[in-house]
Image (tube, rainbow, N blue to C red):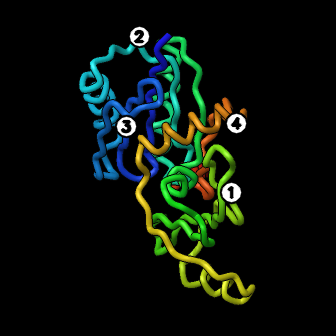
Amino acid sequence: MTQVLLAIDTSAGTAVAVLVDGVVASETYDDNSMQHAEQIGVQIQKCLTAANKKSSDVTAVAVGVGPGPFTGLRVGIAAAKMFAEGVSAPIFGIGSLDAIAFANSLDQPTLVLTDARRSEVFFGLYQGKTKNGIPKALLGPGVKKQSELEAQLQASGQSYEILNGQVSASKLGLLALAQLAEGTASGAVVANYLRAPDAVPAKGKKVSG
């Protein structure tokens, strides 16, 4: 049976890829971080069409679980869950920073950073890989001002290279396949927000009586 994996990540822009038997068949990326809801369905269909596949051909779904902004992650994970349920395919949650690290050698300690807004960064420190190429995490994921993070690492004597990355859906999909091969893939798809959403319920008005 042909394995068709749909990979989705919305921790920054909207990234989608289709992998067929472990080979990347199509990939798209839209860097607009404010239009995930508008883009996700379009990008999924575009990738499936480019890969010459139908929704019903998909045998597994991998989705980035962050860290990332609340709204973006929520849209991507909801779309992935609905798609997987619609085609009766298993779904796997993949760390978005892990996917960035996966694409690099990690011979030296590597600090992976993505924009967390509010003058902060999401971070993970990695070095080395497992036999299947899965990144080994030394620290994180976390969120902090970059200057504070670097001061903390320097104070501990930790050397590192900095990697400012963008999540590739194809790399996220390949990482999911590596985790499946190693038996470490997680079916628990839980968003890693790391902090509370910007929007909060308004306080109720005090009623005098």
- Quarter-wise, where is residue 75 in the image? top left
SS label for mark 4: helix
Disc with the residue nearer the chain's start (4 vs 2): 2
The amino acid marked with disc number 1 is: Lys
Label 3 to label 2: alpha-carbon separation: 17 Å
Give the residue number, with chain letter if any, for mark 1.
Answer: 136
Q: Is residue 121 above or below residue 96?
A: below
Q: Which mark is residue 182?
A: 4
Question: Taking the image as drawn, is residue 3 in sight?
Answer: yes
The amino acid marked with disc number 4 is: Glu
The residue lying at 54 percent from left, 78 percent from top is 146
Question: Taking the image as drawn, is residue 202 in sight?
Answer: no
Give the residue number, with chain letter if any, for mark 3.
Answer: 16
The residue lying at 43 percent from left, 52 percent from top is 167
Q: Is residue 117 left or right of residue 146?
A: left
Q: Is residue 39 above or below residue 119?
A: above
Label 1 to label 3: alpha-carbon separation: 24 Å
Label 3 to label 4: alpha-carbon separation: 23 Å
Q: Which mark is residue 56?
A: 2
Q: Nearer the viewer, mark 3 or mark 4?
A: 4
